[in-house]
Image (spheres, rainbow, N blue to C red):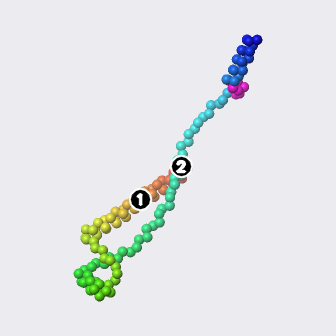
């Protein structure tokens, strides 16, 4: 009796440990294929073009300055401030503006290159 109980326990234990694998079909191997595909490139819209206002330069010579000072004493001078630049400062301002123009032009060329490059890539598919 004890021997049959051990045999039954052994059979139950084997069924539990093997699960249902004795009754199922063998599993088939899965082939994994990796496809490398570039995600679509996002092209944000370009910023609005610059809306620059006109700058009017007025050169204050001693004669013009004397007339302006006379108008100030009379109290009829226009209420506008004057800013002075030395020749070197004006040259620096001019060089800075040229540098900004060059930088913006180069950045726009880089953006155009990548947009054209992306069009070529999507056209090949």
- Residue 62 position in % (x across, y down): 23, 81
Label 1 and label 2: CA atoms lie apart by 23 Å
- Residue 66 position in % (x across, y down): 24, 84
The answer to whether 70 is drawn above or below residue 106 in the figure is below
Q: Quadrant of residue 12?
A: top right
| Residue located beneath label 1 in the image | 107
Q: Is residue 16 visible?
A: yes
Residue at x 71% of width, y 14% of height: 6
Which of these two is toward me, 6 or 41? 6
* Mark toward the start of the polypeptide (1 vs 2): 2
Quarter of the image with the N terminus is top right
- Residue 92 position in % (x across, y down): 29, 66
| Residue located beneath label 2 in the image | 39
Q: Which residues are magenta?
A: 18-25
SS at badge 1: helix
Is 26 magenta? The answer is: no
């Amino acid at each position: 009796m004890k021997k049959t109980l051990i045999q039954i326990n052994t059979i139950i234990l084997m069924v539990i440990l093997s699960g249902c694998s004795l009754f199922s079909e063998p599993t088939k191997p899965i082939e994994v294929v990796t496809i490398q595909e570039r995600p679509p490139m996002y092209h944000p819209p370009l910023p609005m073009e610059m809306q620059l206002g006109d700058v009017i330069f007025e050169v204050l010579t001693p004669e013009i300055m004397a007339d302006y000072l006379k108008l100030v004493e009379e109290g009829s001078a226009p209420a506008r401030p004057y800013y002075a630049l030395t020749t070197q400062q004006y040259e620096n301002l001019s060089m800075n503006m040229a540098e900004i123009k060059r930088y913006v032009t180069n950045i726009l060329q880089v953006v155009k290159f990548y947009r054209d490059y992306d069009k070529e890539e999507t056209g090949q598919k």
